[in-house]
Image: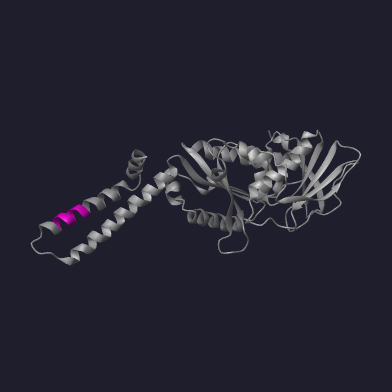
Amino acid sequence: MFNYFLKNIWKTELLAFLTALATLSALVVDGFLAEKFEPLKLIPIALISIYLVSHICKTWTFSSQTYSAIPLPYFICLAQNHEWYISAVKQQEAHIKREGIAWDGIQNNFKIHRQDWAFFDSSKLSDKSSDWIHKAREISNHFDHLSNRIEAQPLYHIFVAAPAPIALGVGALFSGRVPFTVHQHAGMVKNPYKKVHSSEEVATAEDGYHILNRKITELKYIEIKEKEDSDSHDKTIIVLDFTGHRLPKPYPIENGAKVIRLGMKGEEGHIPLSNQWMLIAQEISSVISEELNNESSVSILLGVPSTMAFLMGTILRTSSRMDVFYFNRGLDKYHKVYNLSELD
């Protein structure tokens, strides 16, 4: 670690550091050799000392944060205008700085630019399944390009502003590859982002990411709001209502399909930011996995925040064979965007 710190001292503003150190040494020597002590000479000595201490502390903070894993943001922004995107990027950078991350030093040392860590596309996706699959893979390739540029292990801070099916698919493609922290937009407030999950806080060296894939047998946060059984057990539609806008009926139900509608326990609407989002994602995914394990053909109607969809994707992964539907409010209809396994 100390050698890494010295390496970063050498790399960051070395000329300015040595110039300040030489100037400080000259002033101190001149002060000691002077026949008469002059208090005013302490002012430049104090100012240069403050600069040197500040530089050393800044470099030490950067070195300690990037020694084993480099914290990096990654932002997925689709179907938003450019002004909204720029505003969101600035808010995210301010947020990660408040988290104590030496973001300025990371950008300078690793030559990270906005186009490296923010995927932006203002166009809306069509109702063609191939467009959704292509976009999820395009984001995954963009993400891989950034990961491959970084020599050490990255630790990503994920921000998502995209349709839920894209977030689900990208989460499935990202799954298990890198540690990540996920942040949810909290609305029009002073500090609009809140951390809702950190893989570093959940997983330990002993259990790794297996803890994230455990099946939940007793639902604590969610409940079945509606259940319509059928004589046939080979088709299931799972409706996820976890936003302030309940998914409308009629659902795209095939003949003889069983319908299960899930929501927050004891309430309707949004998921409280104070709740444990990954545990909620595990409970939702456990209900889905149970139906898949029963060899049922499963379709999912995603009425969840994009951040929750991303977390679900990291659990379900691309090995889950289920159809994903999206409700297009502009066209007032559902359409199938892909089968999750098609992303593999």
Task: Tell me which corner region of the image, top left, top right, bottom left or bottom right, holds residue 300.
Answer: top right
In the picture provided, is 210 more to the left or to the right than 336?
left
Please name the residue shown 51% across and 46% down the image.
72
Whole-percent x, y for residue 132 in the image: 71, 42
59 on left or right of 77: left
Magenta span dominant secondary structure: helix
Which residue is at 74% across, 54% downward? 265
Magenta includes 74? no
Q: How many numbered discs, if any?
A: 0
Write down the region rendered in magenta.
Answer: 24-30
Residue nearest the viewer, comparing 327 with 199: 199
Placement of the N terminus among the 4 image quadrants? top left
Horizontal and vertical percent position of residue 180: 56, 44
In percent of width and height, residue 221 lies at: 70, 51
> Where, quadrant-wise, is the C terminus in this rendering?
top right
Which residue, as the protein is rendered here, is positioned at the far front?
218
Q: Is residue 38 above or below residue 151?
A: below
Instruction: Between residue 343 and residue 243, name the one nearer to us.
Output: 243
Residue 25 belongs to magenta span: yes
Instruction: Judge whether residue 135 can be spotted in this image.
Output: no
Residue 328 seen from this side: yes
